[in-house]
Image: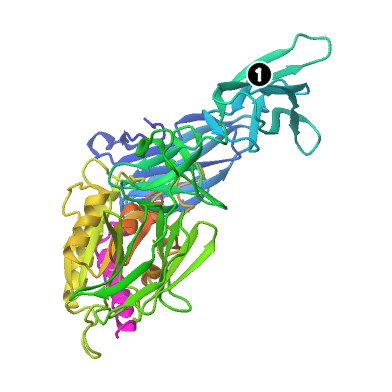
Amino acid sequence: MVVCAGETSKIDVTVEGAEAAQQEPFLLYVIAPAERSETSAEVVHVLGKVAPECKVRVGDEDVEVYSTGGFARDDIPLEMGTNGVEVVATAPDGKTVTRALTVIRKKRPPPSPPSELKVVEPAQDLAVLPGEVLSIRATGPPGLSGYATGLGQPAKWPLAEVVIDDGQPTGRYTAAVRVGTQAFGLALPVRVCLQEEGAEPLWAESEGKVEVWDPAAVRVGETKGERAGITFGTHRVRLGGPYLAEVPAGTRFEIVGARGPDFRIRLSEALSGWVAKRDVVQLPAGTPPPHNFFTSCHIGGDEEYDKLSIRLKEKVVFAVTSETEPANQLYVDLFNTHHATTWLTHKSGAKVIGPVHCEQMADDWVRLTVPLRCKWIWGYWTETEGNVLSLYVRRPPAIAAAGDSPLKGRLFALEAGHGGRSSGAVGLMGTKEKTVNVHAVNELKKALEERGAKVVLVRPGDSAPSLWERARRANEAQADLYVSVHANATGRANGYLRVSGTSTYYRDEHCRRPAELVYNKLLELGWNEFGVVGNFSYAPLRNTYTPAILIEQAFMSHLADEARLLDPEYQRAQAEAVASALAEFFDSVRE
């Protein structure tokens, strides 16, 4: 039998001729499409599996059979109506099996305009201040006129219907309203009315309710828990972020709005952020909003680290970012803060931190610029104790002298992505990403140790520590570099041989260079380009005290990539390429 996409089933094949009963059948798997299927697409993609030593022809083309036994042909054109696609497999002894697939192409029905009125935005409860703009969206029968009303205001706000290029109405209606000052404290829905002349009006109201806050009232919140992420908007992305900052418990701010599960907070006169309500305790009415300053800044160090400390009047949102061009330096941005610093004390214990500069960037925004006297930024972190904020800066590692391996004695934290119940991506032939990642990390460990490096595995075997625990293990080990190894995947709707290639990732600017060097070495192994990706918010990249990169080896969703990642010889070559790139990086930043 031929099975549907996503499943597999063996096909027992008998051989024609007098000796058929004595012949041993061979197996052919057809994974997609089904033996008889219907589609409105212009093309069909065929995916199957056979013994690796067999040859396969799909339609009028021979296709490659990979070491996994997988084969595919993408973009087989379809005529309207019934199409036949033959899949022919030939064994080394010449025996063949033919499977006939029937694909019926039908016209794609035009999108049906909505027949009922529905208010789609606001979809979540909102809290806004007077003067802010409220967006309203609704869907309903096309070609009507209408208006929106609500918020305790008598006004009727006209709706505009979206039209497509040929002027055809779509049944999508929008309005933008500047919020007034009526009905403070009432959470009310938005109501929409659509009407055709001479017909009964259609009414609907929003699922989300809108509350207009009195601008004279002050609302103050304080974070709880170990950390709270501050974002620039209410978007949701798979990895979280991008974060303006992740702040400790007890950080205070003024709350100036809300959307669904998030509060909007004021950081400065010109900048606001968002924080999850679950991470916030609202303080009693009458609590004043935070306003911070500090009069001194102390820079020193001990046997291991440089340290910058400031005593805050109040615990406010702060963020630390790195820069490598034109010089290596850190920026410490403090919000709800004014510049009052008259003492910037530098002591001889500071080996890396240079003369620190403090300036007022805008109302309620102060920046400390922290120059670093080293060839590379080797990591940093912050700690708060009471109202004292401390920035710790790692000093350069003792890289072996020229002529010796630059990796000698250096410690690498290696992470094999996923683990335990999290298999990660699953290849077209059923390969689990977590397994590929472990093999890759084990080979990389060998390659690094052969160059004199030390290695700590933050996810050994099939264990499944949390992402925070992985970063903590690297930090406790005082690793010099964190390398996370994954394998990529994409959707299958556009084929099984379309998206291929390797890529590397980093979050902070001081991690870009090693990511670039590793990427270039991987390209030398013959991969397609998928790029070097910055600002990547994977949690260990955000929370290690050391430079950190992530490698997406190739695509599990591509037959050739999957087969290559399973090849032990390739795994060794990949490990050598990555280790060589890391050696080049360490060699370039010798002090």
Horizontal side, residue 249 vs residue 407: left or right = right
570 magenta-colored: yes
Q: x, y (%) of residue 114? A: 66, 21
Rate crowding at label 1 as few (under 14), some (14 to 19) or many (20 or more) other CA atoms within 10 Å.
some
Q: Quadrant of residue 398?
A: bottom left
Residue segment shown in magenta: 563-591
Q: 332 and 432: which one is in front?
A: 332
Residue at the extreme right: 197
Horizontal side, residue 54 vs residue 148: left or right = left
For mark 1, what is the residue? Answer: 117
Q: 112 and 587: which one is in front?
A: 587
Residue for point 21% across, 71% down: 447
Quarter of the figure that contains the C terminus = bottom left
- Prevalent SS, magenta region: helix
* Disc 1 element: loop
Quarter of the figure that contains the N terminus = top left
Q: x, y (%) of residue 361? A: 53, 64
In the rendered structure, which amino acid carries the disc numbered 1? Leu
Residue at the extreme bottom: 403
Horizontal side, residue 421 vs residue 124: left or right = left
Q: x, y (%) of residue 434? A: 26, 50
